[in-house]
Amino acid sequence: MITEWRRSSADHTTITSHGAVNLAPLRWHDDAIESSYPTLGSRLRKGVMHGFRFTLYFEREVLRKRPYLSRELCVRVVRDPIRVEQQGDDRVRFWAILPELGGRALRVVTLGDRQTIHNAFLDRGFRP
């Protein structure tokens, strides 16, 4: 397996109206994942986690901002929640109490398919 930082062939160098140069961004590339999951470049990333997928927002922002979270914890919450609610915007909320997080409640938000994890955070206001 080859993993490296490299430029995507679809990226371009552009000059904005203000004269700033936008170089093609480097991105993490993993040949084994790329060949197994061709949608890696799309808005969703196929997870290796039992058929669950993760949005780019989850991968880039949620995991970065909340280092105490992992994909495994979020999948556990979706698989075995103590409460589930449908949100108005075609998203679904799942809650579970996790001993690894000091017995606090973790809320995981998925897209409407219930397989694509979009957000996760400790829910201080949760009451079972």
Image (cartoon, helix red, strand yellow):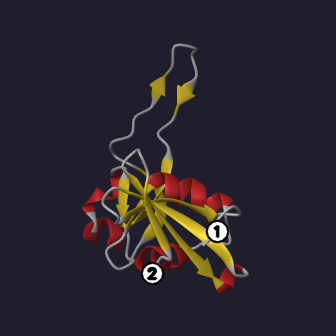
**Residue 98 falls in image quadrant:** bottom right
Residue at the far bottom: name it: 99
Circle 2 is placed at which residue position?
80
Q: Residue at x 62, y 62 (%)?
A: 121
Image position of 41 (left or right of 93) = left
Q: Nearer the viewer, mark 1 or mark 2?
A: 1
Q: Residue at x 38, y 70 (%)?
A: 47
Residue 101: % across, % down: 69, 79
Q: Nearer the viewer, residue 116 or 126?
A: 126
Element marked by disc 2: loop
Residue 15: % across, % down: 49, 21
Residue 80: % across, % down: 45, 81
Badge 1 density bin: few <14, some 14–19, many ≥20, Cα 10 Å:
few
Picture quarter with the C terminus: bottom right
Image position of 37 (left or right of 16) = left
User: Eyeballing the image, is 79 above or below 109?
Assistant: below
Q: Nearer the viewer, residue 67 or 110?
A: 110
Mark nearer the N terminus (1 vs 2): 2
Picture quarter with the N terminus: bottom left
Q: Residue at x 28, y 66 (%)?
A: 37
- Amino acid beneath label 2: Asp
Badge 2 density bin: few <14, some 14–19, many ≥20, Cα 10 Å:
few
User: Eyeballing the image, is 21 above or below 112?
Assistant: above
- Amino acid beneath label 1: Arg
Q: Nearer the viewer, residue 25 or 57?
A: 57
Tell me the tag on residue 114.
none
Q: Residue at x 40, y 53 (%)?
A: 91
Tell me the tag on residue 127.
1
**Residue 44 falls in image quadrant:** bottom left
